Image: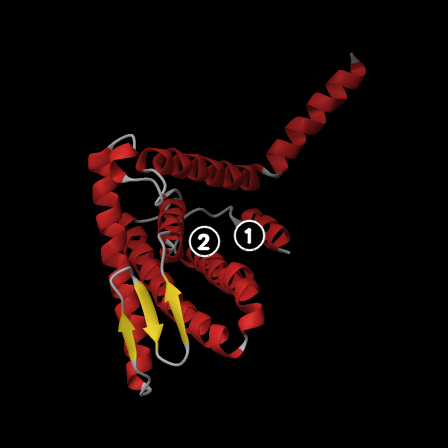
Amino acid sequence: MEKTSKIVYKAKTFVKNNKQMILFVARVAVIYIAWKALSWFLGEESTPIDDRIWPWLSSGWEAFNDSIRIVILNATKLWFDIFGLSSEIQINYRLWVHGYAIVGVGNYCLAIQLWLFFAALICSYTGKWINKLWFSALGILLINLINVFRLIAVIYAAHYYPKYIQFNHDYVFNVIIYIFTFLMWMLWIKKFSSNKNTSKISEATEYEKE
């Protein structure tokens, strides 16, 4: 009985001392589960629209993805046009930079999951809603800008370092964009959130990052 009491006491003490960290983990878990549930209803990109659970919803989702995809492709193409490199966007949403490489942009490459995760995490914290809205919009805009430069870097890497393209695509470039998103979240916590007890979250997430 005494041993059980000690365990309960230690558990309560841990929860009390790490309340903010636990709340942070809970937020992340809820957002992640919500996204996975939504993804299940929307269906995989490779699955025909008519074979998905709600075709009408999936159709709108794919149209939204396509609109973002064409913006990113055009922004990337503009970079190469400025530097005098001939390029064209093909009908299957691939960018061909003549003499360099051809890259395709799938739904996962658009980082929309990261947009939603970032905005949901910001909105889950205390603070003025006007600040949450403009900061979320700014974060999403910057994520897209980084994504454009990521695509530019992928094309250069495919041309100059083809042996490492898979590693760069799957790890290096993704790590960069996730680190940026993490830093944006840290900025929100320090400058805009009205929660005064967030230092432990920052320390915990720094530890997890390492």
Q: Which residue is mark 1?
A: 202
* Image quadrant where residue 39 sits: top left
- Please tell me the numbered disc located at residue 8: none
Are dots 2 and 1 in contact, CB under 8 Å?
Answer: yes
Q: Is residue 177 above or below residue 208?
A: below
Type of amino acid under label 2: Ile
Taking the spot 22% from the left edge, 57% from the top edge, the residue there is 67
| Direction from residue 50 to residue 179 in the image, left or right | right
Residue projecting furthest to the bottom: 84
Tell me which label, 2 or 1, sits earlier in the chain.
Answer: 2
Helix, strand or loop at disc 1? Answer: helix
Q: CA distance from mark 2 to mark 1?
A: 8 Å
Q: Which quadrant does the C terminus fall into?
A: bottom right
Q: Nearer the viewer, residue 194 or 123?
A: 123
Taking the spot 34% from the left edge, 38% from the top edge, the residue there is 43
Q: Which residue is mark 2?
A: 189
Q: Which quadrant does the N terminus fall into?
A: top right
Residue 146 in percent (x, y) is at 40, 67
| Direction from residue 76 to residue 13 in the image, left or right | right
Type of amino acid under label 1: Ser
Residue 19 in percent (x, y) is at 56, 37
Q: Is residue 60 above or below residue 150?
A: above
Q: Is residue 9 above or below residue 33?
A: above
Residue 71 in percent (x, y) is at 25, 64
